[in-house]
Amino acid sequence: MKKFFLLLSLTAALTFCNAQKSQQHRVIILTDIEADPDDTQSLVRLLLYANEIDIRGIVATTSCWMKTEINPESIRKVIRAYGEVQPNLQKHESGYPTADDLLALVKQGLPIYGMGGVGEGKDSEGSDWIIKTLEEDDDRPLWIAVWGGSNTLAQALYTLQQTTSKKELQKLIANLRVYTISDQDDSGIWIRNTFPGLFYVVSPGDDYGSATWTAINSTFDGIDNTTVSNSWLAQNIQQGHGPLGAQYPDVAWGMEGDTPSFLSLIPTGLNDPEHPDWGGWGGRYDLYLPDFSKQKQGGSGVPIAPETREIWTNASDSYTPYLPNEFNRAVKADSQTFSGDKVSLWRWRDDFQNDFAARMDWCLASYGEANHPPVVVLNTPEKMTVKSGQGVSLDAFDSYDPDGDNLSFLWFNYPEAGSYKEPVKIEGAENVHKAWFIAPKVDKEETAHFILKVTDKGEPQLSRYKRIIVTIVP
């Protein structure tokens, strides 16, 4: 009888793990690791979320910064360091794959630059792996996070174009998602032009200063930039956090420029990568045809050209931070409002940096010594339909923290994420577990997004969210 119950328990656990994995976003990473230390930095962070994101491959590629060289061994070195802390990570959350599992996913593209590596006879271990993974019997979209050049993906698409029917190719393309950190070879524009139906997020060209993703490592006037400082990285990531943290290199050009490609795949209650225009940790992006006359040539030598189709690209947010208030109400709106496409990413930066630091603590600390994110429980629907002028109540009374920490609440409207672009005011206090607002007058059906951010008072402070989508009818 004991054996029966043990078998039943193991079966239930396996079923739970499989169900959890089926809900994760699949991703293959293309990385020009060693062209810049930031790829290694991003890989360290990615592995800390290997239980939340279904990593299906990590492919060493070239780029405009490293045209004839690939470095898969550098990927393996970081994974081996991860393997030393994986048992301790498992004490904090389940589902972390073994280092051997991840090492089996390391693949190679060709050591050839750009479109020179695309065409008949240019298949590689990496391009074959993309095809194999895309053709798997799995309804989940396959994300390709491009940290360097995209020619390994271009070769996979070229081969599929030559070897599959038009109908089958369209089916496969429909299940593919691409987030490119700008264009780091000449294959990106070829992919977008050749496969106009492909879901593609990019700040096109090589003018990095105009790209949303650079907000992860830029400093801005009027805000606290501490969490992207070298001293913060040394204290919270690099030193005293075990072998994985020790693999995190010093910044040479910019910290973790590749990380925005997967930040929105992390399940926080805010992120929904299928809707880049909703905004999240990786920034916010709208679907449109960029104005080529405003595009600048960067310094990489990657050719730029007008887009021939709509792409998901830079979108502007207008954001007024809430600041701690020493007396009376615990928070107050800042006197300064920030606007721009980079705002859509850095507005969440302290949250995802604190989350990174907490997970790095997990590498060595026991469960009781570390902090874990709060659990947000919404007692009202996440989607609702109301009439113009109707009062709407929201409640998250049952939210809790697994470590028993005190919780802070913050409710706010996210105008850019919905069709109704005017701000909708939260009536009364916006920092209690209940919120109240009055639906605005509309002449046609509109949507408005409201975000609940719940933050614990652990060290470091961690946040999770709920997004409430309200349809307003006349």
Image (spheres, rainbow, N blue to C red):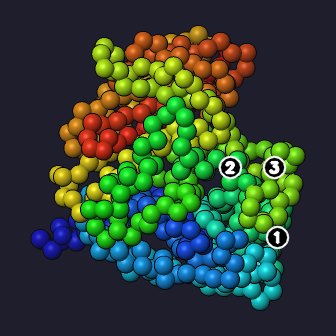
Is 126 situated left or right of 378 in this image? right
> Which of the two marks, 1 or 2, is nearer to us in this view?
2
* Three-letter code, disc 3: Gln
Q: Residue at x 55, y 74 (%)?
A: 34
Q: Residue furthest bottom?
A: 121
Mark number, residue 209: 2
Label 1 sits on a secondary structure element that is helix
* Three-letter code, disc 1: Lys
- The mark nearer the N terminus, 1 or 2, is 1
The residue where tag 1 is placed is 166
* Three-letter code, disc 2: Gly
Circles 3, 1 touching at the beta carbon (< 8 Å)? no
Q: Position of residue 445 (x, y in %)?
A: 69, 23
* Occupied quadrant, residue 459: top left
The residue where tag 3 is placed is 295
Q: Is residue 389 above or below residue 417?
A: above
Q: Position of residue 225 (x, y in %)?
A: 46, 41
Q: Position of residue 336 (x, y in %)?
A: 54, 23
Q: Nearer the viewer, residue 350 or 381?
A: 350
The N terminus lies in quadrant: bottom left
The C terminus lies in quadrant: top right
Label 2 sits on a secondary structure element that is helix
* Occupied quadrant, residue 220: top right
Residue 131 in sight in this render: no
> Which of the two marks, 3 or 1, is nearer to us in this view?
3
